[in-house]
Image (cartoon, rainbow, N blue to C red):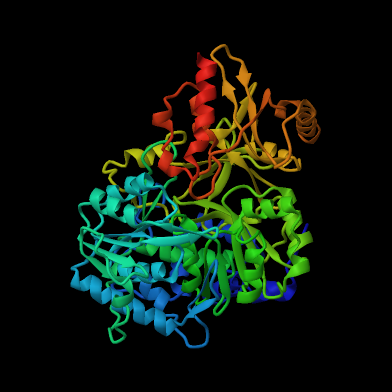
Amino acid sequence: MLWSPSQDFVEQSNLSHYMKWLAQNKKLPFSDYHDLWKWSVNNLEDFWESIWEFFNIIRDGAYQSVLSDKDTFDVSWFEGANVNYAEHILRNATDKNPAILFKNESGNIKELSWKELQSQVASLQHIFRNWNVSQGDCIAAYLPCIPEATVSLLAAVSLGAIWSSCSPDFGTSAVIDRFSQINPKILIAVDRYTYGGKSFDKTAVIQELMDALPSVEHVLLISDKSTFETFLKPITSFANVIQDTDREMKYVRVPFSHPLWILFSSGTTGLPKAFVHSHGGILLEQLKYGAFHNDFKVGERCFWYTTTGWMMWNYIHGSLLAGGTMVLYDGSVAYPDLQALWKFIEDARIVHFGTSAGFILANMKEGIEPVKNFDLSSLRSISSTGSTLPPEGFEWIYKAVKKDVWLASMSGGSDVCSAFVGGNPTWPVYVGEIQCRALACHLKAYNEEGLSVEGEVGEMVILSPMPSMPIYFWNDSENKRYKESYFEQYPNVWRHGDWIELTEHQGIIIYGRSDATLNKGGVRIGTSEIYRAVDKISEIKDSLIICIEEKNGSFWMPLFVIMEEGFMLTDALKQKINSTLRSEYSPRHVPDEIISVSDIPYTISGKKTETPVKKIFMGKDPAKVISAGALKNPGSMDFFIGLAKKRFS
């Protein structure tokens, strides 16, 4: 046990307030969280109706039922009720706390008041109405993590339009692959962004997007320029649009299952899947998760390091739903060095700090100790996601950052724009374990026979629908891709594609993606175990592991490593790697070969991509298994493609 909440911490949590409300208003007393969780998954309708009431959902009309069919995933929620996501954010307007705090790499922290946010959203909404934007129209944004992106999102969805965004660090083809699927009516873009101390001109990209998206009728540009003669289509200045401060805010309340936004899969192995989420589903899920599993409270400053191309940007808007202050950062975590965000916590007085496991491990490897250099007294929680946080990352937080901080490791996906497993302010934190299964997430681990198991590694499955699951995939009229993605292995059971273990504490350990599982001689090995051991070796900067079953029935498990500057992959170092894996895990964890590479492929959202590399070494056509535009570093694949050709020649 690394941390345990104080009695006051527990009693003041939103989760405890909700449990008291259930006892008083529903005559449902629960002794602890696990009892509450069991009730929530066994009584879906009662649970989600309690969320509706507890958070006082604003609606038109009355719903006939909470759930149309609780025994399948092909369901409708709260049919008959009309809601609006933006309305529930802006109802929290106050002059006591700012709505948004923002910083980029070079500037000071800027504040946007709730009044300013409302005014800008109303002004932009007015322009959208003049452009005949209506329910079901798509609005696409090519923007960094700046307040203008939030203003644009709220203005779009306030009218029932459908939002989708990409970050300017996406390759042009990756943006076109996404936006060309949805035929946007409006394009909102920035012609320049800064990252790592460098400025990148995106003027040419915007023109390419205009050429590739004939459905676009209007372009709204965020720019320091006063004229836009270089563009072939008329451009409207974002800055000019939001100067009108006298517009009245209006909300179009839409059916609960009306599309809110479209998120995309990484697209590493083909055209990105387009997840369509609903107004009501995201509204209820974000209220539930943000309040109960992140413990966001009114006025608290909530930050997540993200870009507009990652679901965590959509997710952190749940802090505004909770009445908190959303904190944004536009830039690199490593500029001017890896201590930039720790300084940001101090300066912005951040209460909830969200980041990735990769960022935590990078700090750990560099020997950074924020506790010695910064005032982190405001910090109440640290959340981690994106990949598995190993036990060493847990321990580093409590040793080098803050002893009395709540570490809420979590895991979910763009599929649900939330987390299946995550934080619990009423339970202790155990090293290497995610604290709990989220409320109303009926998650289990299945063994190879499809039986539920605890205390051993199994396939992560969800047995009941969640309102923030996609209402459908865009351009998937018969739900073919949807069904193939989740329901092929187990009928009417959502298979998410992770290896997990449910622990004696009712916590969760994630061992990596099941589709990238190392299956050596019939023994399944999670990739996270390999990375955990290799990350301890100071000479290694990064690594990637795959396992290939050869045609003759044998296995080839190579480990690819990037060396730290000044080191070479010698026989002695290979022996050190192998002995570390053997001693910490087993002889089966020892790779068949260790190969030095200059780069390892990552998606734009920062996830290591083992599966495309694995498929290339299985003889698949590289053009069919990898989309270069979906990678942060597409050139990294050249080495693997070349090596695979040599193996097959």
Looking at the image, residue 210 sits to the left or right of residue 17; the answer is: left
Q: Indicate the quadrant where residue 346 lies.
A: bottom right
Looking at the image, residue 91 sits to the left or right of residue 616; the answer is: left
Q: Residue at x 20, y 52 (%)?
A: 214
- Residue 327, percent across and down? 53, 71
Q: Residue at x 50, y 79 (%)?
A: 111
Above or below, comparing residue 79 to residue 60 in the picture = above
**Does residue 452 appear in the picture of this structure?**
no
Number of residue marks: 0
- Residue 136, percent across and down? 24, 60
Q: Nearer the viewer, residue 4 or 622?
A: 622
Q: Indicate the quadrant where residue 452 lies.
A: top right
Above or below, comparing residue 298 to residue 43 in the picture = below
**Does residue 461 appear in the picture of this structure?**
yes
Q: Residue at x 47, y 43 (%)?
A: 631
The N terminus is located in which quarter?
Answer: bottom right
- Residue 485, percent across and down? 42, 39
Looking at the image, residue 182 sits to the left or right of residue 440; the answer is: left
Q: Indicate the quadrant where residue 547 lies.
A: top right
- Residue 600, percent across and down? 57, 38
Q: Nearer the viewer, residue 204 or 146?
A: 204
Above or below, comparing residue 214 to residue 404 in the picture = above
Q: Nearer the viewer, residue 135 or 255?
A: 135
